[in-house]
């Protein structure tokens, strides 16, 4: 399990570094060809291209199998190397946009793959946000090192190319860690909560992230405009603040199994909204810069971890897992032109009114979204207590109650039943269930995590102790 978690951290870190590093490189090279407004607009062209990659991944994941994956890996590696080299040349505006869009389509595909396979491996974990936050912080920190410690520009570009290619092949290498059929199950209570209407909940999360993106994109564009104009040298040190905010967000979001995640993000959004208002009425730019980097880290972890957790409950998890990044990038494209126009027009009152309206809408959506969740164990506990008081429960009924209480999947129920009521050894049990021995151990490990037990013996002992206490 330790190796799996290292793998998850590695591919998410590499994706964050390559995505942020290439975006930063693209912006800096474009500054030699267009004015500040143009930099902001072309930046959002490549973000829009990445959305296409995120949408394409579920289809690629379904049909690109076997040796075709390795062929695709070779092609993608060549595209990555050539794209970074061309972007570094910054000789032609049109070529820069075309190559940039092609590369960011590829980054969208690899990013969606990295997030999805990470969600497969972390299924059932209560620390998804922590891993996302650690990987985000590590990716930003690597970018800081690449842009500041490594002095030669050619070496900086080489690092991006090497790590981009490494990301591609690590994703192809995923089969050692993530077996989709064994590890991805459509079940409702991955985090101990049931959803009243899964599709409605998914759409509410999409709307929530979209509305929040509008606010954070406005802050991002304000910072980018100032940086591109050269009036303030932002430098690289604030990137450390961005890394720390992502790291803190990951651990804060995981408190009490993510119970306060949405409310923490709501508070960050409120602060960001107030920041926009203050800056537009003559506030200090450095204060807005600090709030921007703090909020950006929290928001990146929020939309990534939220959609990863939601994907377990949806019919097409490979589509939903990476949707947070796609929604954020799409909103950046849609709102960029309007945002830049407002920021450069000096219409302070209009900007303030729009920001407040967005915040009110976010408040309404969050309220409805949170009401879609309700604790599973509390509901089941009440129902089980009534049943226990009314009748003597059979062993099979006790088994079902145990499985329901700990949200075991159908495959995990089959594994537990075999462990409890069969005298076969591990190999025979695996063969009877038509799975590999390694897959059987993964299911046992998942049940151990859900029941907070250790190994097979501890699980069996806990099962019978639970029945003696719960069923009298």
Image (spheres, helix red, strand yellow):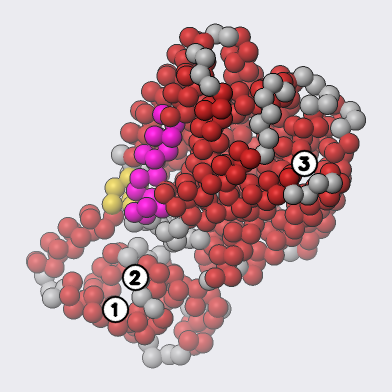
Q: Residue at x 33, y 33 (%)?
A: 367
Q: Residue at x 35, y 71 (%)?
A: 452
Tell me how far mark 2 sits from mark 1, CA to CA.
8 Å
Position of 462 with respect to 10 (left or right) is left
Q: Where on the picture, by quarter, is residue 163?
A: bottom right
Up-down: is 27 above or below 16? Answer: above
- Residue at the disc numbered 1: 462
2 or 3: tag closer to the N-terminus: 3
Residue 436: say if magenta.
no
Position of 196 with respect to 225 (left or right) is left
| Quadrant that contains the C terminus | bottom left
- Residue at the disc numbered 3: 103
Work out whether residue 21 can be spotted: yes
Q: Residue at x 74, y 32 (%)?
A: 27
Tell me how far mark 2 sits from mark 3, CA to CA.
44 Å
1 or 3: tag closer to the N-terminus: 3
Up-down: is 257 above or below 460? Answer: above
Tell me how far mark 1 sits from mark 3, CA to CA.
52 Å
Residue 266: say if magenta.
yes
> Start and end of the magenta stretch?
254-270
Disc assigned to residue 253 = none
Q: How crowded is mark 1: few (under 14 residues within 10 Å), some or many (20 or more)?
A: some
- Residue at the disc numbered 2: 451
Up-down: is 250 above or below 262? Answer: below
Q: Main secondary structure of the magenta part?
A: helix
């Amino acid at each position: 399990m330790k190796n799996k978690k290292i793998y998850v951290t590695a591919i998410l870190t590499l994706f964050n570094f390559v995505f942020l590093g290439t975006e930063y490189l693209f912006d800096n090279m474009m500054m030699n060809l267009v004015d500040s407004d143009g930099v902001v607009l072309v930046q959002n062209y490549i973000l829009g291209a990445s959305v296409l990659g995120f949408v394409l991944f579920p289809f690629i994941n379904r049909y690109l199998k076997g040796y075709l994956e390795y062929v695709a890996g070779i092609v993608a590696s060549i595209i990555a190397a050539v794209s970074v080299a061309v972007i570094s040349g910054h000789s032609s505006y049109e070529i820069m946009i075309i190559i940039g869009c092609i590369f960011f389509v590829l980054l969208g595909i690899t990013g969606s793959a990295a997030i999805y396979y990470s969600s497969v491996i972390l299924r059932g974990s209560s620390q998804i946000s922590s891993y996302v936050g650690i990987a985000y912080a590590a990716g930003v920190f690597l970018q800081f090192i690449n842009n500041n410690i490594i002095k030669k520009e050619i070496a900086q570009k080489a690092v991006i190319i090497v790590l981009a290619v490494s990301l591609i092949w690590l994703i192809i290498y995923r089969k050692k860690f993530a077996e989709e059929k064994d590890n991805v199950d459509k079940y409702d209570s991955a985090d101990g909560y049931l959803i009243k209407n899964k599709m409605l909940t998914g759409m509410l999360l999409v709307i929530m992230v979209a509305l929040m993106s509008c606010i954070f994109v406005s802050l991002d564009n304000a910072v980018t405009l100032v940086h591109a104009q050269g009036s303030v040298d932002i430098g690289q040190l604030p990137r450390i603040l961005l890394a720390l905010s992502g790291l803190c967000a990951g651990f804060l979001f995981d408190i009490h199994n993510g119970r306060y995640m949405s409310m923490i993000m709501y508070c960050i959004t409120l602060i960001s909204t107030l920041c926009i208002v203050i800056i537009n009425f003559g506030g200090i730019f450095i204060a807005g810069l600090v709030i921007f980097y703090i909020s950006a880290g929290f928001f990146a972890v929020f939309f990534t971890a939220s959609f990863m957790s939601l994907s377990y409950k949806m019919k097409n998890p490979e589509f939903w897992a990476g949707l947070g990044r796609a929604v954020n990038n799409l909103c950046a494209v849609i709102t960029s032109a309007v945002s830049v126009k407002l920021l450069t027009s000096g219409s302070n009152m209009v900007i303030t009114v729009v920001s407040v309206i967005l915040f009110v809408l976010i408040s309404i959506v969050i309220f409805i979204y949170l009401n879609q969740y309700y604790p599973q164990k509390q509901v089941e506990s009440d129902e089980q207590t009534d049943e226990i008081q009314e009748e003597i429960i059979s062993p099979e009924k006790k088994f079902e109650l145990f499985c329901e209480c700990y949200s075991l999947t159908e495959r995990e129920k089959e594994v537990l039943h075999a462990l409890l009521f069969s005298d076969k050894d591990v190999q025979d049990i695996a063969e009877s269930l038509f799975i590999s021995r390694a897959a059987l151990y993964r299911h046992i490990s998942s049940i151990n995590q859900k029941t907070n037990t250790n190994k097979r013996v501890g699980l069996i002992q806990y099962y019978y102790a639970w029945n003696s206490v719960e069923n009298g």
